[in-house]
Image (cartoon, rainbow, N blue to C red):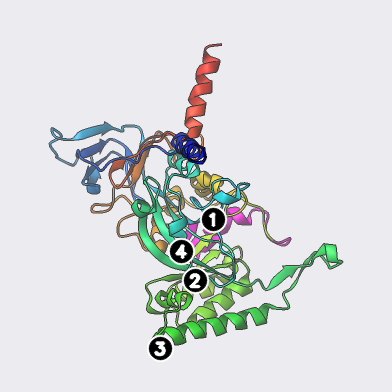
Amino acid sequence: MKNLKTACLLIIMLCASIVIAQQTPAPKQTNDIAIIGATAHIGNGTIINNSIIVIKNGKIDLIGDAEESIIDMKDFETIDAKGKHIYPGFIVPNSTLGLVEIDAVKASDDDAEIGSLNPHIRSLIAYNAESKVIESMRPNGVLLGQITPRGGRLSGTSSVVQFDAWNWEDAVIKTDEGLHLNWPSSFSRGRQWLGEDPGLQPNKNYNKQISQLKDYFNECKAYNNGNKTKIHLPFEATKGLFDGSKKLYVHVNDEKGITDAVNFTNQNAIKNMVIVGGRQAHKATGVLKKNNIPVVLKRVHSTPSHVDDDYDLPYKAAKLLVDNGVLVALETSGQMERMNTRNLPFYAGTTVAHGLTKEQALQLITLNPAKILGIDDLYGSIEKGKSATLFISEGDALDMRTNKLTHAFIDGREISLETHQTKLWKRYSDKYKNQ
């Protein structure tokens, strides 16, 4: 009886996995593909109005003007994209996609570990490539992401993946590329339930918390400069910060915290740093530009964080930074962040309404994050020799009214744009058409 119950349970689990599984990942490209006639938005600010793009072996073999390019189409699979637009695949940094499926189901939530100092935690091995949430990103052109852990002071390491894979081994593009530090806040809110003033108050423990960080990083440096007779996994994980092979992503929003974090990295000889969040980064553009530090800007569609902020600060913050020579990318963290990631192109579209050009806004979610993540040699723009990770849209991809994808490719593989939502849309569309 016990064996029968076990067998029944295994059958039920297998059936459930089949029902909820993502589409089968696309196979490798076998036929050469030519996309003809579309307006190509290269991702570096350039536009080709009547383009031809040739894809061979997963790479872009040719990009140019269709009228000026002479090529024999006899052996090509051709896509007529006249009147449509082509874009590089959108890239979302600082994401927990694939780490949480359903917030209310604890067993599907794996975005944070117990403890405060966890530099050795690897988000990649917890990444669920078959997440139905990930599947729903692709119809809006979001094809790549930086999978990032949460929680604690040092959350762990992030990795960059593509969104059409069997498992995390197949998905990974860049492994353990950065370490994430949640910088102490220089202000905190009083606990009203304890009779404290609920307004912002100076954080009395701020200096102590910074001192603890300094001590920890000194220990890390001492270990990595020592003989390592015994392996210490947390200290070992910080090695890349000091030799330049990893980036330190500092999650901080206030002006003082940003300035202190930059000074901290300089004092500790950390070679590559990125500000994540950066609500008040526009007030620290001088120090950011001087130290060549990029900003992954917190969600555009949000309210101001301080009472004296301009009402439209989150919308125009990207322009304020770009105008001051800071490299900027957009992220989507916050309430319902995984589901809202599909709105990444429309966040970029909002920055157009507040001063950026469309091509500048496009760079915020293509080439800029590729540069920040260190994958711009292959991704982020449509250029010869780069990965053919791109999509075709019927209209402006930054406008939710017209961004309707007809084709999408990751490394030259034409991926499915079918999702649970599209299946339901078709199902109920048919239902009401027949009434």
Residue 189 quadrant: bottom right
Q: Where is mark 4, residue-wise?
A: 122
Are the two marked residues, 4 and 3, in contact with CB atoms closer than 8 angstroms? no
Query: How far apart, in angstroms, are the residues tagged by discs 4 and 3?
Result: 24 Å
**Which residue is label 1 attached to?**
110
Q: Are marks 2 and 3 in contact (CB under 8 Å)?
A: no
* 154 vs 252, nearest the viewer: 154
Quickly name the residue at label 2.
119
**Amino acid type of the residue that numbered disc 1 sits on in the rendered structure:** Asp
Dot 2 alpha-carbon crowd within 10 angstroms: few under 14, some 14 to 19, many 20 or more: many
Query: Disc 1 or 4, which lies upstream in sequence?
Result: 1
State the extent of the magenta-drawn residues as a range: 306-332
N-terminal-most mark, 4 or 3: 4
Q: Secondary structure at mark 4?
A: loop
Determine the image quadrant of residue 270.
bottom left
| Residue nearest the viewer, comparing 330 with 48 | 330
Q: How many marks?
A: 4
Asked if residue 352 lies left or right of residue 363, the reply is: right
Three-letter amino acid code of the residue under disc 2: Pro
Image location of residue 166, percent across then percent down: 36, 46
Q: Is residue 12 above or below residue 98?
A: above
Q: Secondary structure at mark 2?
A: loop
Relative to 74, is 374 above or below? below
Query: Which sits earlier in the primary sequence, circle 2 or circle 3?
Result: 2
Where residue 79 appears, x then y in whole percent? 27, 33
Q: Which mark is residue 226?
A: 3
Residue at the outermost top position: 435
143 to the left or right of 109:
left
Furthest toward the right, the residue is 195
